[in-house]
Image: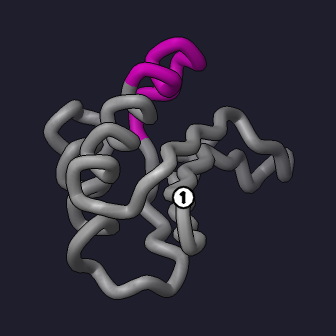
Amino acid sequence: MKRPRLVIFKSNMFLYAQIVNDETHTTLAQVTVKGKTIKFAEELGTLVLEVAKKKHVTAVVFDRGGYRYHGAVKAIAETVRKGGLLV
């Protein structure tokens, strides 16, 4: 399996992250937090790291979902990068 994709989605109240295997078209893991601030984005990044470790995922490709790379999206990416999931 190539590196799975970490997909970010933002709604009005929630931040979502999914780890997707594009070869088999399946979602390996999904995490949600209520809130859109940088604090909640960092929490989401930490949860992604925990879930990825349980699913034996060692590296991902970051898919920002068309959102600009700043604020919450940047905080998620930096947290996941610090945990070693993004190379």
How crowded pointer 1 is (Cα within 10 Å; few <14, some 14-19, many 20+) is rated as some
Whether residue 24 sits left or right of residue 22 in the image: it is: right
Residue at 49% x, 26% y: name it.
52
Q: Closest to the observer: 1 or 76?
A: 76
Residue 24 to residue 61: above or below: above
Magenta-colored stretch includes residue 54: yes
Q: Secondary structure at mark 1?
A: strand
Quadrant placement of the N terminus? top right
Q: Amino acid at mark 1?
A: Phe
Image spot of residue 63 (x, y percent): 49, 67
Residue where numbered disc 1 is placed: 14
Residue pictured at 38% horizontal, 62% vertical? 36
**How many numbered discs?**
1
Closer-to-camera residue (8/34):
34
Q: Position of residue 37 (x, y in %)?
A: 29, 61
Question: What are the residue bounds of the magenta stretch?
Answer: 50-59
Q: Is residue 55 left or right of residue 36?
A: right
Rendered position, 83 above or below 14: above
Tell me the quarter of the picture where residue 49 sits: top left
At a point 42% along the width and 55% down the height, the residue shown is 35
Residue 74 position by quadrant: bottom left
Residue with the most extreme top position: 54
Asked which colour scheme the image uses, the reply is one colour
